[in-house]
Image: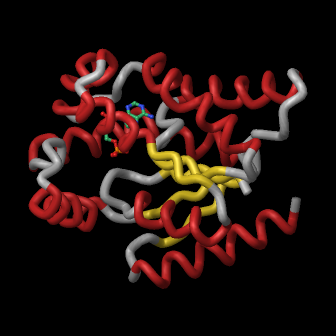
Amino acid sequence: MRILMVAPPGAGKGTQAERLAQHFGIEHLASGEMLRDELAAGSETGEKVRPYIDRGDLVPDELVLQLVLDRMLAAAERGGYVLDGFPRTLKQAHATDQAAADHQTAGGTDARLQAVVHLAVGRAELQRRMRARGDADGRSDDTAAVIAHRLEVYEAETEPLLDYYRDQDLLICVDGERSIDEVSRDLIAALDRAVVRQ
Ligand code: AMP
């Protein structure tokens, strides 16, 4: 199974992606986690991306593509993936499609997305959840001003992906304003149906 989760920050994508990874026995690839690992390791990439993350801006596409694409193709070879937080721009989406097509041409397994899941959560609830997460985890980009900016960036850069994947008949929308268990149950049922249909 090869899945992408597209949702605003605070919608619960990380939690749900982890559950889907366990349920389907696939790898959870979270671009934000990979970037935070680079920050914590003090690597060259970490130093380059720090100012973007602290401001709540997107990191340049090239840096993220370098970090995620090879891991995505390797995970496809091992049975699948759930992408969490990547692609986040149309440029990243096009590069991901191209990388999957090139991988297959070169004799690799089919690495293309089979389903794209959107968790729908209203703005007030998102802000409430992110503030709670900032207090609990001490994430430097979960402060009030940065939260508001990250939501704006999501609407401008990432929301257009919904139409892009709807046009490819890959999009599944799920109400994310319910309990974690209810959302997981719906997601798994919808994904089972989507993949049977293919
Ligand atoms: P997340 O944990 O997914 O909320 O990501 C935290 C931060 O990492 C974001 O606010 C961005 O600064 C950066 N980031 C994560 N994924 C991407 C991506 N695909 N493209 C650009 N920046 C990203």
Color encoding of the figure: secondary structure
The answer to which quarter of the image holds residue 150 is: top left
The answer to which quarter of the image holds residue 179 is: bottom left
Residue beneath the point at 75% across and 31% down: 100
On the picture, is 32 further left or further right than 136? right
Give how far across and how far down residue 35 sits, in percent: 35, 34
195 lies above or below 155 = below
Figure label count: 0
On the picture, is 70 further left or further right than 128? right
97 lies above or below 45 = below
Give how far across and how far down residue 149 sits, in percent: 21, 39
For the C terminus, give its image quadrant: bottom right
Residue beneath the point at 52% across and 24% down: 65
Quarter of the render that holds ligand 1: top left
The answer to which quarter of the image holds residue 163 is: top right
On the picture, is 125 further left or further right than 112? left
Q: Nearer the viewer, residue 186 or 135?
A: 135
Give how far across and how far down residue 48 sits, in percent: 27, 16
On the picture, is 127 further left or further right than 175? left
Residue beneath the point at 75% across and 72% down: 192
Residue beneath the point at 47% across and 36% down: 88
For the N terminus, give its image quadrant: bottom right
**Which residue is the extreme one toward the front?**
41
Give how far across and how far down residue 60 sits, in percent: 39, 19
